[in-house]
Image: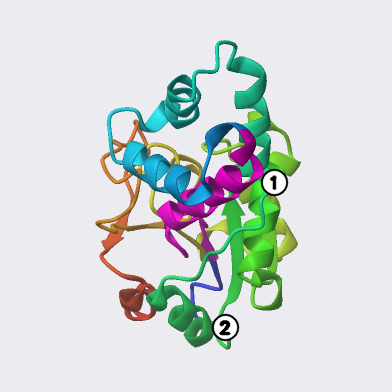
Amino acid sequence: MQSIQAVIFDLDDTLYPEKSYTFSGYRAVAHAHSDILGDPEDTHRRMCELFDSPDRAKVFNVLLEEAGISDPAPKIAEMIESFRAHVPTIEFFPDAANVLKELRPNYQLGIISDGYLVAQQNKVAALRLAANIDEIILTDELGREFWKPHAKAFKQIAERLNTEHHACVYVADNLAKDFVAPNALGWQSIFVDRPEAIHRSNQPPDGGNPRHTIKTLAELPTLLTALA
């Protein structure tokens, strides 16, 4: 019997490019708030410019300042809500779509993903993940305090899949938080080092170094075979 029985994935920048979700959200905000921001295409273009600037963390603030809004706080809250609630236009990384199909006959598949619940639910729906994944845990359903690196979601998904921890693998992209819990539980941990990943420069905390690193999910089936 193979030693690896369940392969669990992170979502953002592991199975699809997170930047595409952000830009999709920017477009939704630009259209929803065109009454004060102006032409949606110009606004979207400006937001994408700001994303690639030192002002990435305050894109909405800069836009409202440029629009001459003197009390931006209420409008920022509305824009954030538009961003999180929008139905995203996103697609799998090509290697992700292929590997899910390849692994499906031989392993149980799961997802553990952080993020605000409605946003993560909309991503799951846009990618039609429910049809191809055995168990999905969006940690915001458990409570913000149970976002990674907390171990609760990892314990829960192993129980749902009726799989021992040593037979589980977690594949993810964020060294700052993704591998602490699976390492502590005895899982195999695999870092997919994508050049375009938003969090690629993050550093791992104590106990957070991945056991293995791959450059693309196309390498994953071979690595799983070797681990078995």
- 160 to 60, vertically: above or below: below
User: At 50% across and 42% down in the image, what residue appears?
Assistant: 181
Residue 105 appears left or right of 14: right
* Quadrant location, the C terminus: bottom left
Is residue 159 found left or right of 228 in the rendered image?
Answer: right
Question: Looking at the picture, how far across and down is residue 132, in whole percent?
Answer: 64, 77
As displayed, is residue 116 above or below residue 192? above
Observer able to see residue 196: yes
The span picked out in magenta is 8-35
Expressed as whole percent of the image width and height from the top left, the position of residue 25 reads 55, 48
Disc assigned to residue 117? none
From the image, state whether disc 2 or disc 1 is nearer to you. 1
Of the numbered discs 2 and 1, the one sitting upstream in the chain is 1
- Front residue of 228/102: it is 102
- Asked whether 101 or 72 is in front, the reply is 72
The image shows residue 133, relative to residue 40, as above or below, that is below
Structure colour scheme: rainbow
Please name the amino acid that badge 2 sits on: Arg
Secondary structure, mark 1, is: helix
Mark 2 sits on what residue?
104
Residue drawn where x is 59% and y is 31% of the image: 36
The residue at which mark 1 appears reads as: 85
Magenta stretch: helix, strand or loop mostly? helix
Task: Decide which of 130, 35 is in the foreground and name it.
Answer: 35
